[in-house]
Each structure stands twice: as structure tokens, then as C-alpha cells.
Image (cartoon, rainbow, N blue to C red):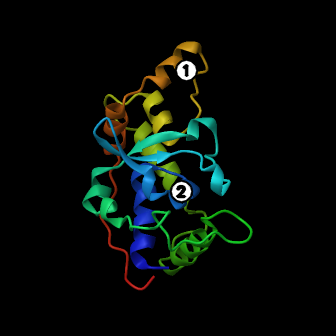
Amino acid sequence: MPEPTFRLVTLIAAYTGMRLEEICNLRNEDIQEVDGIPCFLIRPHPEDKWTPKTEAGTRNVPIHSTLLDWGILDFRKDGEKFLFSELKTPQSGPRGTDFGRNFSKFKTTIDLPAAITFHSFRHTVSTRLRNQAGDLRELWIDALLGHEASHKSQGARTYLSGITTENLKQTVETVRCPTFRLRQNL
């Protein structure tokens, strides 16, 4: 797997909390501006028999400024359907299966514990957002991560549908990761 692909899939997870399959199934057309903010559009793609895990999983995820600085918008390739066109869909299993295996191999080379999985990025982002001091609302975090609202009231459902892209951008921008450099030749 090309190192830039490995690096960028990992960075997207670290800065957005997106699920591996959401990242691996991103199409070039799924990067669009919404309300003037670059976003990943997580949405069903029935032609490939792929849908987000839950109804709440269909959402817009503002692209973190660090990912923009890393050149995510320049990563798109003309004539390719998928953002990560080098990832292939195996005969059995989802599109991210091979990436997940490569990540597991890589983590052992850097002595990460077996309990750490790719999904750990999602848990880390969720925990960091929920522990933020400030103006982040639980509903914004749930909307960003594609979680079903823990508040099932009609008011919560109405409010969830009215969360602005700017609120989601504010939420995603609070994610901070230590700076690191993945070694070459992954």
C-alpha cells in the first residue's frame, strides 16, 4: 500500500473519528463544500452496495484544517471513482479489509498493544471531544461522529436536523493530535 494512502487514511481517522469503511468508501465526489466549508459527505452508494452503519451515519463531516494543510483536496485523482483508488474491494468483506490488516501489521512494528485497533481512533476522538471544556454540545459531537442522538425527544431530533455546518466545523477543529511522522516504506 502506498505510504501517502496509509498516512492519509490514518490522519482522517485521527482528526475526524470517521469509521474505517466510511473513509475507504469516500469517492472524489464526496468531497464538497457545504455552506462554504470543505466537507466529507458520508452517504449511501447503492451502486456499490455500501451504506453508512446507521441512519445517523449519513452526514457531512467538515474537513479538519490539518487535513487541508496535508493536501487532502489535492489527493483526488481525475478519472478515479474513489478517493483512495488503490484500495481494492476484496471478494469477501468490506473495502477497508486490506487496509485494516495492514494497519494491524504496522501497529505491531511500532509496539502498540494488541488492544489498540483502527477503531481506537474513533473512540479517542469521541473521548477528546466529550472532555473538551467550552461550548461543544453533546448533540454536535453525536452529529459529527454519526451517532444516534442519546436524547430521543422530539426536540432533540428537531435540533439535530438544524445543526449548522459551522457548528460541526467548530467541533471537528477542537480535535488536536500530537504531531508525528510515519516512517517511510509502509
Residue 27 in picture, x, y percent from top left: 48, 57
Residue pictured at 33% horizontal, 50% vertical? 64
Residue 113 appears in which quarter of the rendering? bottom right
Residue named by callout 2: 120
Q: Nearer the viewer, mark 1 or mark 2?
A: 1
User: What is the secondary structure assignment of the residue under circle 2?
Assistant: helix
Residue 85 in picture, x, y percent from top left: 49, 70
Residue pictured at 40% horizontal, 66% vertical? 8
Image quadrant occupied by the C terminus? bottom left
- Relative placement, left or right, of 170 versus 99 is left
Q: How many marks?
A: 2
For badge 2, the amino acid type reads: Ser
Give the answer, above or below, for where 12 lies relative to 184: above
User: What is the secondary structure assignment of the residue under circle 1?
Assistant: helix
- Relative placement, left or right, of 33 versus 103 is left
Residue named by callout 1: 157
For badge 1, the amino acid type reads: Arg
Which sits in the foreground, 43 or 9? Answer: 43
Alpha carbon of mark 1 to alpha carbon of mark 2: how far?
A: 28 Å
- Relative placement, left or right, of 35 versus 20 is left
Task: Return the residue found at the far front.
Answer: 79
Task: Return the residue found at the far right.
Answer: 92
Residue 61 visible here: yes
Q: Residues within 10 Å of mark 2 (few under 14, many from 20)?
A: some
Which sits in the foreground, 43 or 179? Answer: 43
Q: Residues within 10 Å of mark 1 (few under 14, many from 20)?
A: some
Residue pictured at 46% horizontal, 39% vertical? 144
Q: Which mark is residue 93?
A: none
